[in-house]
Image: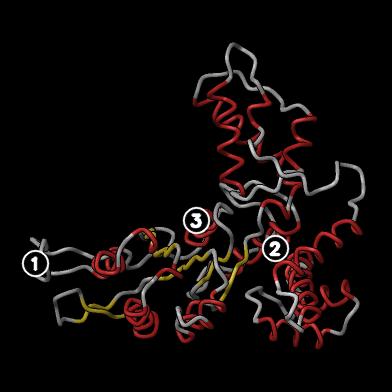
Amino acid sequence: MPSQPHKESLDAPLPGVVGDSRAMRAVYRLTRLVAPSRASVLLIGETGTGKEVIAHNVHRLSPREDGPYVRVNCGALSESLLESELFGHVKGAFTGAVENKTGRFEAAHGGTIFLDEINSMTPKLQVKLLRVLQEREFERVGESRTIRVDTRVIGATNRFLEDEIEAGRFRDDLYFRLNVVPICLPPLRDRPEDIPALAQFFLERYCEENRRDTAEIPGAILDKLRHNEWPGNVRELENCVERCVVLSHGQALQFDLMLPSNERRMRAPHGKPADVDALIQQLVRASMQKWPTDDDHLHHQLIRTVERELLEQVLPLSDNVLVKAAARLGINRNTLHKKLAEFKSPLVASEDV
């Protein structure tokens, strides 16, 4: 088994990932720590945050690097097609099965399988996946012969699986098998300091692809990019930069084309403190609209929502270390641990000091 990476290098950026914010350094650290193991990994993050890039890095840094890396989008196929895609089938198993087919789990033997949008799996397939994780075996559709595989599973979801469990859409035993090491990818709006480097990176890539001269992005444009909400995250930013390169006429790039059409300016201008009081007023008004006036739990709902968001933002900025996060919050470490358990937080909170 390869030796653990030196501590000094754990936080270094990973190939294919741009960003040096504290939140992303925590992601790099977890990725490097979990990669050499056999543990299942669950990547949690909004659409466009780069879950597949992190999954590929887990594979690349693992002893399975020379083995296959197989990706499956579980949300793109129906139950029957996904079952055949994952586990394979034999000729005649169903209408249209004119020949034997090797499934993705079998194809990934000795390597890694990345299951994107794993929350969209049906209960039937969740049972079969649980068996693969527990026993490392399965049968092809239409066949009774058992196939054994040595395949590492990396799952990804853009939803909190705890909520899916409470709604009866996801098995808790499967969740615990998958959630050995969760890695939470921060949305782009929570790491605005990474936006200039990301934008310049994409600009150079698409200028090279389209044979255009590269230029530095003006400070005024970067300022607007930093203060956008980016609901589509890194993928949306990449699309905006590509649009700028493709639609600009003449030699000069028209950097205004880089701005999203629906700019959201929730943040204060760069260099000025945010108007926290105004944001609090806006939050309270929105909460009163969300929860009916006849609901006598408004205080509990609002405080609980704010508290959970506070914990989920402070932990990554504290390298997911309980002692550091508790010190920053000004509360006892045991109190923080209890609150995380109450919220069923998917964030990793290390006990390391």
Cα–Cα gap, marks 1 and 2: 47 Å
- Say whether disc 3 or disc 1 marks the residue closer to the N-terminus: 3
* Snapshot colouring: secondary structure
Where residue 192 sits: x, y (%)? Answer: 75, 48
Q: Nearer the viewer, residue 159 or 33?
A: 159
Find residue 139 and report its horizontal and vertical position in percent: 22, 78
Q: Residues within 10 Å of mark 2 (few under 14, many from 20)?
A: many
Q: Quadrant of the C terminus?
A: bottom right
- Along the horizontal axis of the image, is 179 left or right of 85? right
Q: Is residue 36 above or below residue 298?
A: above
Q: Closer to the camera: disc 1 or disc 2?
A: 1
Q: Nearer the viewer, residue 219 or 147?
A: 219
Type of residue at label 3?
A: Glu
Q: Which residue is mark 3?
A: 52
User: First in sequence: mark 3 or mark 2?
Assistant: 2
Mark number for residue 91? 1
**Image side of residue 322 versus residue 110, left or right:** right
Residue found 18% across the figure and 74% down from its top = 141
Q: In the picture shown, does residue 118 fall above or below 212?
A: below
- Residue 148 horizontal/vertical position (percent): 27, 78
> Circle 2 is placed at which residue position?
26
Q: How many marks?
A: 3
> Which residue is painted at 76% across and 83% down in the image?
297
- Picture layout, residue 249 above or below residue 315: above
| Three-letter amino acid code at the position of disc 2 | Ala
User: Closest to the observer: 219 or 289?
Assistant: 289
- Secondary structure beneath disc 3? helix
Disc 3 vs disc 2: Cβ atoms closer than 8 Å? no
Residue 163, position as x, y percentages in the image? 56, 77
